[in-house]
Amino acid sequence: MREQVGRIIQKLEQVRREQVSCFGADSHKFLLGSSLPEREVQAFESRHDVRLPEEYREFLLHVGHKGAGPYYGLLALEDWNDGYPIDPDELSEDALGQPSPVTAQLTQEEWEDLWESEPVRAVQGSLTLAHHGCGIYAMLCVSGPSRGRIWYGDLDGSCLYLVPDPDFLHWYERWLDELLAGYDFRDFGYGLLGNEAELLSTFLTTQDDKTRDDALRSLVRMPSLTEDSLQALLECLEDTNEERCRTAIWALGRLRPNEAVEPLLSLIQREESTVLLVAAIDALCKFPPFANVEPVRQRLHSSNRSVSNTALYLLREHQKVQMEDVLALFHSESADLRDRAIFATGWIDSSDVVPFLVRALSDPDSYVVYSALSALAERDAVDTVPAMVALITPETSERVLSSIARALGSLSTHPDAFPGLVKLTHHADGFVRNDAIFALGETGDKRAIAVLQQHLSDEETPETYDEDLCSWKTCSFSIGEQAQRSIAKINGEVLEPSGMTNEEMVAWIQSKHE
């Protein structure tokens, strides 16, 4: 055991020297807290009436007790109950001494039933080693038949996975070995142990679905694969098991073998599963540009936003977004797809874009019009100001009017922009008035001062509940305060920044007087 501990110390030092990067490393930087004295470990054991597994005990005494480790790193010993579904104050001291029910024979259904009826008993006899994120923890059995083994589980009891490593030291050393070998860190600890040949043989010959999937899960994390393994992944694209197919797609996207492009395109043409379509298109995004993007282009018109967005992103990466794509999307009955069409114009350099965006201002959906106004402002399309001003009518939604105000502030060199903004400062909606007043300050036009002075006594601070975002929308200042700030900006005065912490405010005040 001491020999293994020595290897672990050397490998951790090598990881630091080689500046290896992985998920969670930002939180621990591959540094460990100091090892614990024997008396402190014994005190913990005495308090909880338990003897820690020898391998973990050896690590605490001779390597370290928190920090560098899988996912977000090892937790300190005193955080042993972080993965427990109960307030620590309500937890008995002997929880670790009670036998853990986790065994290799425990089924997922039995685990969920146990968690539902007795969640504390489900995790008793285990201490929390590390947090994976998303409520998933690595737990070490310290009592019961699986003492010394590590299992993964989440706080809602929906998953249980017994890691194949026999003990803590083997689990930790495998983590270091895989980091140094260049494995993908996704799903560390899941799957089977073994080299590529062993895992491939298991995947191809076993009849048990779980064993096959575990073999595949380990195989796809390897830094590179032989032709035989790549062929097995390509054959998985025809598999009726969706999760197995998705795992193979992900691996092909990571490894990017040239022979995978056509099979992935073929899958995109025939597949109806949203999960697999998004996975396949996303995988192809990682490949060098290829000629035949038509199967992906056809998926632009998917009613599923994720599929359409991913297809659009691939075309952008390959610099294949065309004006014809935009026009085809905009003819959709789906407002979401029409909005995607507006978004896609940002990747096209064509004289047809601005006229198209002006036509989009008449779309019946306010979000689409909002996007078109923003796109025109980004293109500095000053000549379109009259079309924007024409939208300032009592029937136009407040969302669109606020967007018009912001666009006119950006395009203020057009003679129609100023009177349009003045008109909006008298609108009944506070958000519209506030945005118009802010935009007048952005113009720097001295004529705006007289207009803004009329609003100095307006004490309304616009506030509303946005049902689409399920949150409150509130302005930072009252309308009168915003008018004052806009006047100050036009006069070239230094404005007090908003949203500052006390420390930031002190620094800002000091900078004014330097």
Image (spheres, helix red, strand yellow):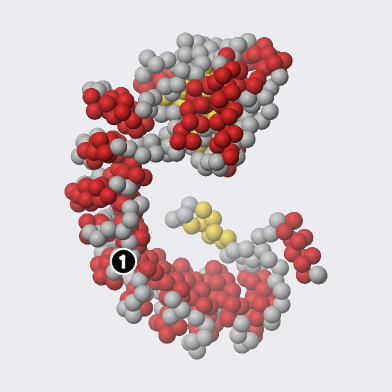
- Write the residue at 55% across / 21% down: 4
- Write the residue at 79% across / 65% down: 510
- Write the residue at 34% across / 73% down: 360
Picture layout, residue 336 above or below residue 135: below
In the depicted view, which residue is nearer to us: 314 or 422?
Answer: 314
- Whole-percent x, y for residue 304 in the image: 30, 53
Task: Quadrant for the N terminus, please.
Answer: top right
Picture layout, residue 331 above or below residue 225: below
Is residue 454 at least partly visible in the picture? no
Is residue 251 at least partly visible in the picture? yes
In the picture of the structure, the residue carrying the numbered disc 1 is 321
Task: Quadrant for the C terminus, please.
Answer: bottom right
- Whole-percent x, y for residue 6 in the image: 59, 23
Quarter of the image where one finds residue 344 = bottom left
In the depicted view, which residue is nearer to us: 23 or 103?
Answer: 23
Query: Is 467 positioned to the left or the right of 14 in the image?
Result: left
- Whole-percent x, y for residue 448 in the image: 61, 84
Quarter of the image where one finds residue 196 = top left
